Image: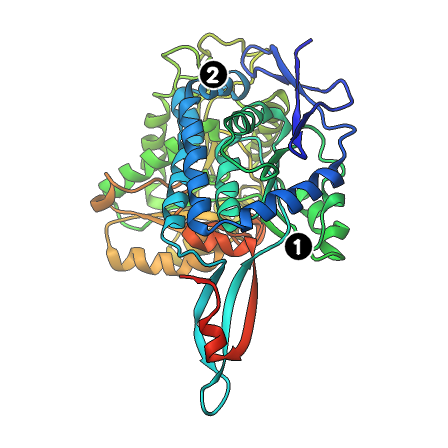
Amino acid sequence: MSELLPNLLGDRWQTGAGRGTPLFDPVLGDELVRVDAGGLDLPAGFTFARQTGGAELRAMSYAERAGLLRAVADVIKVNRDDYFAISTANSGTVSNDTSVDVDGAVYTLGVYAKLGATLDAGSLMADGEAEGLSRNGIFQARHVFAPTPGLALLINAFNFPSWGLWEKAAPALLSGVPVVVKPATATAWLTQRMVADVAAAGVLPPGTLSIVCGSSAGLMDALEPFDVVSFTGSAESAAVIRSHPAVTRRSVRVNIEADSLNSALLLPGRDAQALALLAKEVALEMTVKSGQKCTAIRRVLVPAATYGEAAAAIGARLEKTTVGNPRNADVRMGALVSTAQKASVLEGLALLRNQTEVLFDGGSRPLIDADPERSCCVAPTLLGTRDAAGSDAAHLVHDTEVFGPLATLVPYRDMEHALALARRGEGSLVASVYGTDNVAMAAAAADLASHHGRVHVISPDVAATQTGHGNVMPQSLHGGPGRAGGGEELGGLRALRFYHRHTAIQAATSVLDALPLSA
C-alpha cells in the first residue's frame, strides 16, 4: 500500500482516519500516494490559524511579510527537481508544462515580495486621500484597508497544484492573513510536498500555512464571519459554496474562478502575419498542460473567408505535437491528469462533434511510450463550424467547455457578428485579438472588455515580447464575469483588497494624520 500523506493543521502533521484515496500516475496507471482528511478537528485547526498564525502575521509590517514570500520562493527553488519529478508522475506533464506550474509560482511569489517591499511600515493600507466633511475642513474621512482577522481557505483545481497554491497564498500572506489550502485530490501530492518543505524550513510562523488533503467535508462548516474563500473549479462546485450557510448567513466572502469559454479573435482582412500569430497561439494553448488550463483558447473566431487558411495553419502547428509518456524526450504533450478527466474530455469531444466537423485529428497517430488503453493521453483535436450560419447554430460550442486539448474554429460574417459570438461565452477569463490595425484592435479590445477579465492583444510588433494568451501574469487581473465566476485575483497590489476589510474613518485631520498608514 502506498504512503498516506499527512495533513498540516494546528501546526501538527496529522493523518486522516480512513484508508485514503489513492493518487495515480496518469500515464503508467501506478498508484503513487494516498490522501485522507477523515477525523481531523477542523474547527480547532482553523482557530489556531486565526489566533496564532494570523496574530503573528499582523504583528509584522507589509515589508516584513514580503520577506516571508522571498523565503518561500527560495525553498521552492532548492527543491525544484523533486517537484518536477512529482509533477511528471502525478500530473503526466512534460518538463515545459511543469515549469509553467513550478517556476510560475516562484515568479509570482517574487513579484509580490517586491511589491510588498515598496509598502511602508503601517498596519493599514490607504485608499485615496482624505476628503473633507466639514466647512472648515478639519473634520474629514479617510478610507483604509485593514487585514481581515480571519483566515483564507484556498480551494484549488487539479491543473496547477503549485502555481494555484502560491498565486492565492502570496497576496493573502502579504496581507497578513493565514492560509488553509485544500488542493484538488487528483494532483494533491505536489501541493502537499511544497507545504511540507516550507514547514520544514521554518520560514513561516506557526499556523500561517496549513493543508488539508482529501475530502472537503466540513471545511465550509468551520468558517467564521471574517474568513474568506478563494475557489477555483467547476461552476457546480462554486454553486455549492455560494449557497453554504457560511456565505449566506455568516457573510464569509468568496472569490470564484469557474468555467470559461475563452476566445481568440482574428480581425478581418487577409493578413498573413496576424494569421501566423493566431495559429501559433491557438496550437500552444491547445497543447500546454494538454489543454487543461482555465485560460486556454476554446473558440477561435476568424473571418469566414479565412476559415480554410486558418484550419490549415493551426493544423500544421498541431501536426508537430507528439503525445505520450512525458519521460520520453521526444514527447511534447503528456497526459490528462486522471481517468475521470480523460472520460470527461472524450465525452465532451463526442458531444461537440455532433455540431461540428473535424479539421485536425491528432488521435490518428500512435502515442509514444504510452498504452492508449491504460494511459490518460488524449491527442489534440481541432473542430470547426464550417460557415457563419453554423457558428450561430452550434450552441454547444458556446455553452460547453471541454477541459482538454480541444478548440473549435468559428467563422464569422463581420466584426459585429464576431463580437456577438465572443459574448456568447457569457463571461470569460480572457480573449485575445490578432491584427495589424491599431485602431481596429483597440476598438475590439474596448468592446470585449465588459465580458472578459483580461483582453490580450497580439500584433506583429509585440510578437517576440507578448506574454501569451493563457499565461496569467501577477501584474494583471485574473478572473472574469458571468460564467467565469465573477471573481478577481492578482493584478499586483489589487489582489490584497480581497484579504482586507474596507473602512471609512471619520475624524479630525490631526487624528487621521496619526493613522498607521502604509502607502
Residue 127 placement, left or right of 245:
left
The numbered mark at residue 226 is 1
Q: How many marks?
A: 2
Q: In this view of the protein, can residue 70 be seen by the observer?
A: yes
**On screen, 181 above or below 140?**
above
Q: Amino acid at mark 2?
A: Ala
Q: Element at badge 2?
A: helix
- Residue at 55% x, 72% y is 504
Q: Nearer the viewer, residue 382 or 278?
A: 278
Q: Give percent across and percent down for residue 503.
A: 56, 67
Residue 449 placement, left or right of 438:
right
**On screen, 86 above or below 217?**
above
Q: Give percent across and percent down for residue 29.
A: 60, 11
Query: CA–CA distance between discs 1 and 2?
Result: 38 Å
Q: Nearer the viewer, residue 17 or 422?
A: 17
The numbered mark at residue 89 is none
Q: Give percent across and percent down for residue 467.
A: 32, 41
Q: Nearer the viewer, residue 50 or 305?
A: 50
Residue extending furthest toward the left? 461
* Tag 1–tag 2 contact (CB < 8 Å): no
Q: Quadrant of the C terminus?
A: bottom left
Q: Determine crowd level at label 2: few under 14, some 14-19, many 20+ residues with C-alpha closer than 10 A.
A: some
Q: Amino acid at mark 1?
A: Phe
**On screen, 198 above or below 142?**
above
- Residue at 66% x, 46% y is 51
Q: Which residue is mark 2?
A: 85
- Residue at 53% x, 78% y is 507
Q: In this view of the protein, can residue 287 be seen by the observer?
A: no
